[in-house]
Amino acid sequence: MQYKNFRKQLFYGMIGVGVLGSLFHFVYDFTGKNRFVGLFVAVNESTWEHMKLMFFPMLLLTGILVPKWRETYANVELILNLGNLAATWLIPVLFYTYRGILGFGVSPADIATFYISELLAFWLILHLIKYRGNPLLKRLTAVSYLLIVIQGIAFMWFTYHPPALGIFAVP
């Protein structure tokens, strides 16, 4: 019963992440290009900025689910963090892979990379939650939080200080 409830909440969370991520694509312009808001939402059309559309909604979902499920699933923090990192980094992997194969981009495929990344990450979360009793996973929770913090800081810093790399380029 608990796994079924977790799956149900995760499903609703997946819908929320998809909706919130989609809305985050437009929030920067809606707020009159507010620089603080821009730290958390896409400020341009670069691949890097589109990764933020997944990262921050997934982070919010983690903050909602962890207090509810920590007692039941000891490694829920680690698993949700890994899901967040996987979803975030699958976006450029899928985006550049499909564009590399085709040699050009297609707008619906660009959008699909977000949702496919999300689906794969939520599948990963459901798969990993089964290993809740593994003590090795418990030790990795602190590492996962460190990676989440580093990723969050990188998103905020590179929003307004992007290096001259392709992932930060605006097409």
Image (spheres, rainbow, N blue to C red):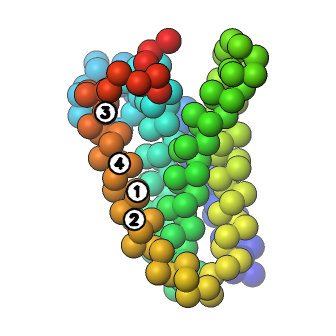
Is residue 114 toward the left or the right of residue 155 in the image? right
Q: Mark 1: which secondary structure?
A: helix
Residue position marked by numbered label 3 in the rendering? 158
Residue type at the position of mark 3: Phe
Q: Residue at x 33, y 42 (%)?
A: 154
Instruction: Give the quadrant of residue 114.
Output: top right
Q: Mark 4: which secondary structure?
A: helix
Residue position marked by numbered label 2 in the rendering? 145
Closer to the camera, 46 or 18? 46
C-beta proximity under 8 Å, tags 1 and 2? yes
Mark with earlier residue (3, 1): 1
Residue type at the position of mark 4: Gly
The reply to whether residue 103 is visible in this rendering is yes
Instruction: Give the quadrant of residue 148.
Output: bottom left
Q: Is residue 140 above or below residue 56?
A: below
Residue position marked by numbered label 4 in the rendering? 152
Q: Residue at x 26, y 37 (%)?
A: 157
The spot of residue 169 in percent (x, y) is 43, 18
The spot of residue 63 in percent (x, y) is 43, 63
C-beta proximity under 8 Å, tags 3 and 2? no
Q: Is residue 107 above or below residue 72?
A: above
Is residue 62 toward the left or the right of residue 14 in the image? left
Closer to the camera, 131 or 27? 131
The spot of residue 67 in percent (x, y) is 45, 74
Residue type at the position of mark 2: Tyr
Measured in 3D between alpha carbons, the distance from the residue under mark 1 to the one under mark 4, in whole angstroms, is: 6 Å
C-beta proximity under 8 Å, tags 1 and 4? yes
Residue type at the position of mark 1: Ile
Q: Residue at x 39, y 65 (%)?
A: 145
